[in-house]
Image: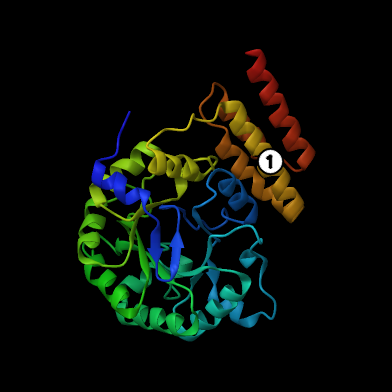
Amino acid sequence: MYSLAPQLKEKLAKPLKIGNLTLNSRVFQSPLSGVTDLVFRRLVRRYAPHSMIYTEMVSAKEVSHLTEIPRIMEIAPDEQPISIQLFDSRPDFMAAAAVKAVKEGAQTIDINMGCPVNKITKKGGGCQLLRQPELAEAIVKAVKQAVDVPVTVKTRIGWSDEEINILDFARRMEDAGADMITIHGRTRQQGYSGKARWDIIAQVKEKLSIPVIANGDIFSVEAAVLCMQVTNADGVMCSRGTLGYPFLVGEIDYFFRTGKLLPSPTLEERLQCAKDHLRGLWEYKGQRGILQARKHLAWYCEGFPGARVWRDKLSRINSLEEGLYLLDTLLQSLSSGD
């Protein structure tokens, strides 16, 4: 059993102020492209009623050309607190998109300055902004002037091991008006390999007065506690740890607030959640949702004998009925011990 030091326990018991917004949770669900749609967010929200949750990242350029809000920005009335994350390299596009995002219901605007994907960085967005701090400052300032909700930044520690510039970059973001910064403790060059550098996040926390949220390698309650002890951050953001496991944000939040562990969901409960996820994607997106469900169902199938075979089957489904049949068959085999 792991415990919280008294000083850390006191911090975690307090609400978190982000600009003019007060949050009753210090655990965040990261924006994940192709994952954090409305259906997934509802599952996370089921277990984490107070946590800030993010949409998938939205192209400011695409939003600027559309008269109607794209579905990727759609927010349900019961989703608060929620943030919309935007990406682009042009301050005017970002400001205009931020205005639309606030009208849609976003309680904060998050600016993506950490995506390592080539198609984003080649256009000057994501991690590329780490190499253009003046432009990054201009984007933050433009968005701040355009909206009256908190503006936050999500980024990485640097472009490569030779270009770790997060200390200077984070100070610039704070000076430009950012109300919070989330730092993934890896470089762009690392992608998702190696270990997250929580020690560097700790250095940033020492220098800034705005909230600093730690991101990277948060796969369990234990990891979240250790991360908070190392970084002294103001909270943690869960990313890949929630793939096939939307319980994680709620588990960490519960421990932060109470110092107690929730019972881990049984395999049967995880698979029932998978069924809810599949149905939700079908109801929300139709056949496209079924195709998207393939990866999610595969992620749910972990930690039992024969899981690989079931992952292969579920990653090939073509209908709601096929998916439900396979999950029910798996549940029956587990209950009978086959």
* Residue 201 % position (x, y): 26, 57
* Residue 71 % position (x, y): 67, 66
**Residue 190 as seen in the image, left or right of residue 121:** left
186 lies above or below 74: above
Viewer-proximal residue, 31 or 227?
A: 227
Q: What residue type is labelled 1?
A: Asp
Q: Which residue is drawn at 63% across and 19% down?
A: 334
74 lies above or below 132: above
Q: Residue at x 51, y 27 (%)?
A: 303
Viewer-proximal residue, 132 or 148?
A: 148
Q: In which quarter of the image is residue 2?
A: top left
Q: Residue at x 31, y 44 (%)?
A: 9
24 lies above or below 145: above
* Residue 15 % position (x, y): 40, 56
Circle 1 packing at 10 Å, graded few (<14), some (14-19), many (20+), is some
| Identity of the residue furthest to the right in this view | 321
Viewer-proximal residue, 53 or 284?
A: 53
**The C terminus lies in quadrant:** top right
Callout 1: SS: helix
Residue denoted by label 1: 276
Q: Residue at x 26, y 67 (%)?
A: 209
**The N terminus lies in quadrant:** top left
